[in-house]
Amino acid sequence: MPRQFFVGGNFKMNGTAQSISQIISNLNSAKLDESTEVVISPPSIFLVLARQLANGKIAVSAQNVFDKPNGAFTGELSVDQLKDAKIDWTLAGHSERRVILKEDDEFVARKTKAAIDGGLSVILCIGESLEEREAGKTIDVVTRQLNAVKDKLSPAEWSKVVIAYEPIWAIGTGKVATTEQAQEVHASIRKWLREKISPEAAENVRVIYGGSVSEKNCQELAKQPDVDGFLVGGASLKPAFVDIINARL
Ligand code: PEP
């Protein structure tokens, strides 16, 4: 079975009830590639609205989740609360949280484990900074980020993970990785999956690319053998998101 193409839309801290309703209404009425899994990730205050409005073919993801089950954790959301709200996915380890909110590899790994234990699927974001890339450390960095998660998950639990390779220097900058750069890192991630998790994980875990994906560059990226889809930020708020979902049509 080939890996199902996956396109996620990360709305980040953008939108209003009105604009998000409009985006979802456009998605509901658009002709979307039936073979692509589509997941949208609105700000937490609009998760319930998004789940109510989106049709059954569109899944909804939180942008973040906490690693503790409940209690005195002001401002956080638990896995059970997301499940109760019929949210089936969460992002973990987005670079904006790693960099701005200082989330480290261990915390991201704990959240990933808590999410999977509670029945969520996880879009696990990894990626290097420009400084790290220029120092030739890209593979070391993504491997370090993956190893932290490996320490928490059983091999079977990787079936609940989509890995989003998002070079930090490409996020929101308009500077997309070349198809060769993306394919090279994705192939390394797949090799890591084969060697450190299992041949099944290497075969089945989706590795998606994020970083200034647009309707203009998505088709070339989608042709790369180890690019199984996209995590889209800015363009997911625009009508062009439909073209990205349909990149392989
Ligand atoms: C993201 O936030 O995950 C992202 C890839 O953003 P953008 O597409 O805007 O670069």
Image: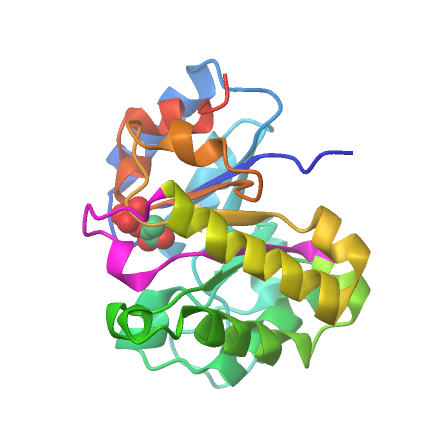
Residue in the image at 65% along x and 60% along y: 191
**Residue 211: % across, % down:** 32, 50
The quarter of the picture where residue 179 lies is top left
Q: Work out whether residue 73 or residue 172 is closer to the camera in this orientation and state it.
A: 172
**Residue 161: % across, % down:** 64, 57
The quarter of the picture where residue 168 lies is bottom left
Residue in the image at 45% along x and 83% along y: 73
Could you tell me how many numbered marks the image carries? 0
Q: Is residue 235 above or below residue 143?
A: above
- The question of residue 166 being in magenta is answered with yes
In the picture provided, is 124 more to the left or to the right than 17? right
Residue in the image at 56% along x and 74% along y: 111
Magenta-highlighted residues? 159-178
Q: Work out whether residue 73 or residue 217 is closer to the camera in this orientation and state it.
A: 217
Evaluate whether residue 118 shows in this view. Answer: no
Q: Is residue 46 above or below residue 188?
A: above
**Residue 122: % across, % down:** 58, 58
Residue in the image at 50% along x and 67% along y: 65
**Residue 215: % across, % down:** 31, 27
